[in-house]
């Protein structure tokens, strides 16, 4: 029983330290119309490393989810 409690406590503690974030936005052209099915690329600012690529939907909307925060 004590082992089970320790295991559960450890899992809860490790999950509480794991943080993730999200970024969302809408891509439009100069006339304000949504740009559909465009690839939007997210790079790390410090070393220009590719982080994630998402594609806009029919309304020009895209979401980057489960991004690690530092």
Image: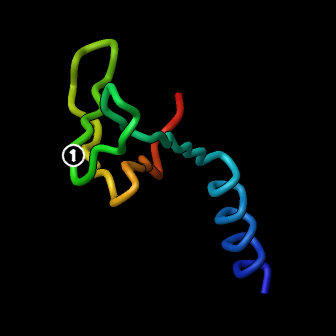
Q: Quadrant of the N terminus?
A: bottom right
> Which image quadrant for residue 41?
top left
Q: Tell which of 16 and 6 is nearer to you.
A: 16
Describe the element under mark 1 as helix, strand or loop: loop
Q: Is residue 17 left or right of residue 9?
A: left
Residue at image position (36%, 41%) is 33
Residue extending farthest to the bottom is 1
Q: Tell which of 26 and 29 is nearer to you.
A: 29
Residue at image position (44%, 41%) is 26
Instruction: Examine the rendered structure and indicate whether residue 24 appears above or below residue 70.
Output: below
Q: Is residue 18 left or right of residue 45?
A: right
Classify 10 Å Cα crowding around label 1: few (below 14), some (14-19), many (20 and above).
Answer: some
Instruction: Examine the rendered structure and indicate whether residue 37 appears above or below residue 70.
Output: below
Q: Tell which of 18 and 21 is nearer to you.
A: 21
Residue 19 percent coordinates (x, y)? 60, 44
> Which image quadrant for residue 42?
top left
> Which image quadrant for residue 28?
top left
Residue at image position (40%, 34%) is 32
Q: Is residue 9 left or right of residue 63?
A: right
Per the image, the residue denoted by label 1 is 38
Residue at image position (46%, 51%) is 65
Residue 38 percent coordinates (x, y)? 21, 46
């Amino acid at each position: 029983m004590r082992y089970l409690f320790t295991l559960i406590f450890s899992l809860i503690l490790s999950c509480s330290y794991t943080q993730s974030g999200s970024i969302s936005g809408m891509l439009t052209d100069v006339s304000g119309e949504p740009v559909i099915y465009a690839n939007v690329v997210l790079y790390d600012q410090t070393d220009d490393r590719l982080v994630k690529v998402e594609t806009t939907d029919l309304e020009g909307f895209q979401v980057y989810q489960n991004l690690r925060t530092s």
